[in-house]
Image: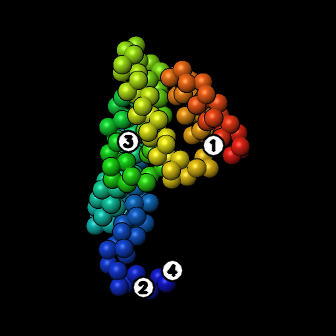
Amino acid sequence: MDLFALESKPKLSQRISALIAAGAILLGAVPGAFALSPQVPIALRDQASNAVESSEYFPLSRASAYLEKSEHAKALKYLVEAVEINPANILALFHLGCAYLELAKTSDIPEQQAVYLEQAQQAFERVLNLNDELTLVYFKLGKIALMKNDIEAAKQYYQAGLQGD
């Protein structure tokens, strides 16, 4: 890519500048909070903060904080938001599937468990549609199939995962 061509595309060059500036932001201990370096000019910090908060990475970072504490239900809101912003974000889709799968494992209500399993399966299938070489996803789908008592589907997913390894 010709870097000088960016001058004719202000939106792209602004986005690149904002993403570079976003590198100056360090995530704080509180989910979604930012600790900004005082050496970064205020205008650049504001631009970086706006770029991060309007991208899928802001809700994804908040979701990550909840996932680290195994608070899957709280993480769902932010994972769904990240996927709505960018439906092709494989990381957000994968974690969305994992969150739903964990909620299904802990649900005592069979109807709710079935809904969580279906949502997890849909998220993982979307991941495979974007990249079918992620073998871990096949194993997650195999686990879902087992939880649904679909032994044949589980075998197929596990075999597909082993072939990709």
Near mark 1 (Cα within 10 A), the count class, few <14, some 14-19 or many ≥20, is some
Circle 3 residue? 79
Q: Residue at x 35, y 80 (%)?
A: 9
In the rendered image, residue 71, in percent from the top left (x then y), is placed at 40, 28
**Distance CA(mark 3)–CA(mark 2):** 34 Å
Mark 3: secondary structure: helix
Identify which amino acid the numbered label 3 is placed on. Leu
Circle 4 residue? 1
Near mark 3 (Cα within 10 A), the count class, few <14, some 14-19 or many ≥20, is many
Circle 1 residue? 135
Which one is in front, 158 or 42?
158
Q: Residue at x 40, y 34 (%)?
A: 119
Mark 4: secondary structure: loop
Q: Who comes first in sequence, dot 3 or dot 2?
A: 2
Whether residue 30 is visible: no
Q: Residue at x 41, y 45 (%)?
A: 61
Which one is in front, 68 or 56?
56
Identify which amino acid the numbered label 4 is placed on. Met
Mark 2 or 1, closer to the camera: 1
**Distance CA(mark 1)–CA(mark 3):** 21 Å
Which one is in front, 86 or 126?
126
Circle 2 residue? 5
Mark 1: secondary structure: helix
Identify which amino acid the numbered label 2 is placed on. Ala
Identify which amino acid the numbered label 1 is placed on. Thr
**Distance CA(mark 2)–CA(mark 4):** 8 Å
